[in-house]
Structure formats: C-alpha cells, structure tokens
Amino acid sequence: MTATTTAPSAAPDRVPAPVRPPSPRLKAWATRAPLLPALIFMIAVTQLPFVATLVISFFDWNSLYPDARSFAGFGNYGDVLTDPALRKSVWTTILLTVVVVLASLVLGLALALLLDRQFKGRGVVRTLLIAPFLVVPVAAALLWKHVLYNPEYGLFNGLLHYVGGPQPDWISNTPLLAVEAALVWQWTPFMMLILLAGLQSRDKQQIEAARVDGASDWQIFVHLTLPHLRRYLELGALLGSIYIVQNFDAVFTITSGGLGTANLPYTVYQSFYQAHENGLASAAGVLVVIGSIIIATFALRVVSSLFREEVGRA
C-alpha cells in the first residue's frame, strides 16, 4: 500500500495595510512648526510690551509716587490730545514728516533719473549716493551737528567765511530746518533706490515708440514715467512716513527737543524719563503706534498692488 502525501499549499501573500496619508491639519502644523520659535520670539518682544503699555496708559501713574497709582480710563488720552505742549508736538511731528518725505522724494527722483542713464563710473556714484542711508542715525545726527552746523569750526560756516559771508548759528536760528536737512540727507538714498527700481522696470519698447512718434524727454517723463512711478512714489512716501513719525535720534541729538523741535516720540521720552509720568507717556506712545499702523496698512496695500502688477506683466 502506497502512502500518498500532499504538499502543503503555499500560504497566501499578506497584503500590506494601506498607509494613511497625513491629514491636512497635520501637514499644516508640520510646515508651520519651524516658524513657531520666531513667532513666539516676536510676540514676546513686541506684542507683550505693547499690551503692557496699553494697560499702563489707562492709569494715572507717576513713578515717583507709586502708591498714588489710580485708574484713569481715557483721561491720559484726553490729556495728550488737549495739552498745548503735546498738541504742538503732534503738529511738529506732522510738519517734520511731510517736509522730510516730500524733499526726499523729489531729490531721490532726481538722483534716480541720473543713475538710470549710462555713464562711466555709474557704479561708484551709486555706491557713494547710497552711503548716507547706511550711516547709523545717531552718528549721522552727530555729523551734522558738529561737522556741518557748528558755528565755530563747522563746514558750512567755513565755506561762508571763505567767501566773506555771515557766520550764523544754524541750530539756534533754524532749529527745525536743521533737523529736517539731516533727515533728508539720510533718507534721500532710500527714496532713490525705490524709484530707480521703478525706472528700470519701465517698458523700453513703449518709450522707444514714443520717441519715434516725436515725443520730447519732458513729454515722456510727464505722460509715461510719472504714471508708471506712481506706485513707487506712494511706497516711498508711506515707508518714509512710518520711520519719520517715530524718529527720535535726530531731534534728541541735534536740538535735544528744544527750540520748538520736540516731536511726539521725544515728548514721550520727556514724559517718561524726565517727568516720570508713566501713564501719560504710555498713552502718547500708543497713539504713535496707532498712527504707524495706519500708515503701514496703506504701505502693505501698495506693496501688494505692485506685486500683482509684476505678476500680471510676467
């Protein structure tokens, strides 16, 4: 009798379990996780101090009398808006911002038109023109105060003495103009760079077609260049305004806030460090921040519109 053996049948292959794709929510967290340390740092450095300043602005708080602290509501804001000295500082801030931004834009446009042309040594000239914007603000203010404005050994009076002119005390005679000139000197290169980028993004074929049709340089500038530069002019004005509204270095260094040059940031400094009025200074600081945010909002809209225009051209 023969025994019949049956070979065991091979085990069926195991089908691997399907891998579940990560959920969109997990993907979002994975891409944002590297940014969390920067976000936490930004909140800790900027937002928490601002919240503390906002809270202090609602208190009548003099650091010399800490036990006399009391809740004042919007009283500090009312003082900022009604006090003659503070209102004057607001007007000085507006005047300083408008003059510096407009003068910087006009000079920056002139320099940008110059650098848009081809000439020998253009790279060196561009580097030299950008240099003032790279100087530390306090160093730039000290340069103007001692090297240029000084009535005894300053460069301006030295040149006037050479031609037999008067020897004015620039800071005492024209204090606000002295601060404005220093800021214009420092911010003109910034405006020049923005407007130069706008000039170099013009449609060259359109300009050549206008020249073929007999248009003069002035007509091309008025009807083609200026409309094209409108967004860039707005961007330069808004970004410059954000900085000049908050400027403290030039006012503090050149005039120490005297002779009618105290702007709102310097008034905040005086209220906080000299008068020790923490609540009043915090209220003024909050108003400066609100004004800067409003200007920055318009600046972001202009930047977004510029990006959309560039994408549309591409």
Image (cartoon, rainbow, N blue to C red):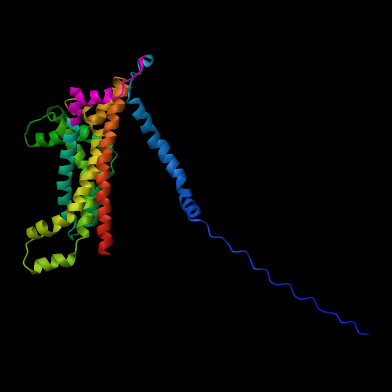
Compared across the picture, whether 278 is left or right of 224 comes to right
**Residue 214: image location, x then y, percent:** 6, 67
Magenta stretch holds residue 146: no
At 22% from the left and 60% from the top, the residue drawn is 201
Give the farthest residue toward the bottom.
Answer: 1
As displayed, is residue 209 above or below residue 275?
below
Outermost residue toward the right in this view: 1
Check the image and report above or below for 174 versus 18.
above
Q: Is residue 146 among the parts visible in the rendering?
A: yes
Q: Residue at x 23, y 43 (%)?
A: 240
Could you say which quadrant of the image residue 10 lies in?
bottom right
Instruction: Pinpoint residue 243: horizontal percent, then vertical percent.
Output: 26, 39
Q: Does 210 sit left or right of 33 as displayed? A: left
From the top left corner, tell me how far across and down residue 261 is, in percent: 18, 29
Write the residue at 37% across / 32% down: 51
Asked if residue 75 is among those painted magenta in the image, a careful observer would answer: yes
Q: Main secondary structure of the magenta part?
A: helix
- Residue under the image location 36 percent in, 33 percent down: 50
- Where, by quadrant of the figure, is residue 56 drawn? top left
Quarter in which the C terminus is drawn = bottom left
Q: Is residue 220 left or right of residue 248?
A: left
Nearer to the camera, 5 or 168: 5
Residue 228, position in %: x, y? Answer: 17, 57
Report the front residue among 168 and 85.
85
Q: Dividing the image into 4 quarters, which one contains the N terminus?
A: bottom right
The answer, for residue 270, to whether it is visible in the render is no
Part of the protein shown in magenta: 68-90
